[in-house]
Amino acid sequence: MPGRLIAIGDIHGCSRALEILLNQIEPTAADCIVTLGDYVDRGPDSRGVIENLLTLSKRCQLIALRGNHEEMMQAVVGNQQPPGFWLRHGGVDTLDSYGFVGDLEVIPDAHLKFLEELIDFYETETHVFTHAAYQHDLPMDQQPAERLRWHSLRDDVPLPHVSGKRFVVGHTASLEAEIVDLDYLVCIDTYCYGEGWLTGLDVRAGTVWQANQAGQSRTRPRI
């Protein structure tokens, strides 16, 4: 039998919530887990999140998307941009988790490689996964990076995509820690770093698992 196809929303340095969530999900080698980006910044343990994801990649098929926070981090680490913008948006928390005292070499090579290998979207026969959003009238290989990684659903919600596929996204945090389900579009950023929940969604079965930094876990009605 085919394994499960599971999406996990924005983690933002919440390694404890991620560990609890994965204990609920119990990934197997047959499963495919799609992480939607924003692994780093704002929460207390970005380093631990990436370590957990590297370990997870040995247990199941891991598809890791690039979020806007990984984009900011890579631009600084690669000396493509000055650090100010990233530091104002959570980069300080990330550097603290690595024990940064002035030398970016504290970031392990394996973590840099993980960041380099992140992808912009993942598409199956029925679903498309992006970090933030999409442009409804363009095929996926023509999508602007800004729409995929930076666009907020608070600015506008895209129409159904021309492919007819269901989209699963993160990025636009629900301050009420609620999943936003528009049928053709589901947003599962449930504000983990802001005392909300980290959400995992089995996109075929509709099963929802959630965990938080306080050590709590729960399952929700299927969507």
Image: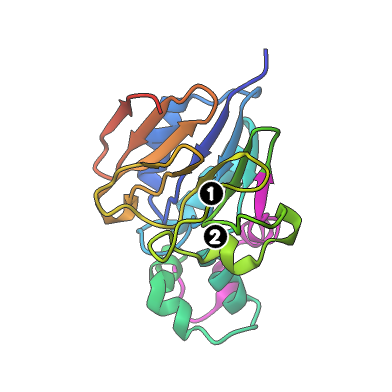
**Per the image, is 114 magenta?**
yes
Looking at the picture, how far across and down is residue 195, in whole percent? 24, 51
Q: Which mark is residue 36?
A: 1
- What amino acid type is highlighted by mark number 2? Gly
Q: In this view, does 169 lie to the left or right of 21?
A: right
- In front: 80, or 169? 169
Residue at mark 2: 67
Q: What element carries label 1?
A: loop
- Asked whether disc 2 touches disc 1, contact meaning CB atoms under 8 Å apart, the reply is yes
Q: Where is 35 relative to 24, above or below?
A: below
Cα gap from disc 2 to disc 1, whole angstroms: 7 Å
User: How far from the left and from the top, in percent, is residue 12?
Assistant: 42, 56
In the image, is 213 to the left or to the right of 5?
Answer: left
Residue extending farthest right: 141
Work out which quarter of the rendered image holds the C terminus and state it: top left
- Report x, y in % for residue 189: 40, 49
Residue at image point 42% right, 28% down? 23
Q: Magenta segment, which residues?
A: 99-122
Give the residue at x 33% y 37%: 211
Q: Please state the horizontal and vertical placement of residue 89, each as a whole percent of the image.
A: 40, 73
Residue displayed at 64% across by 62% down: 112
Q: In the rendered structure, which disc, 2 or 1, sits on the residue that comes first in sequence?
A: 1
What kind of residue is marked 1?
Leu
Q: Residue at coordinates 60% horizontally, 59% vertically from top-left? A: 135
Q: Does the magenta stretch include residue 149?
A: no
Q: Would residue 216 be visible to someone looking at this image?
A: yes
- Asked whether, in this view, residue 202 is left or right of residue 116, the answer is left
Q: Is mark 2 on a helix, strand or loop?
A: loop
208 vs 136, nearest the viewer? 136
Scheme of image coloration: rainbow
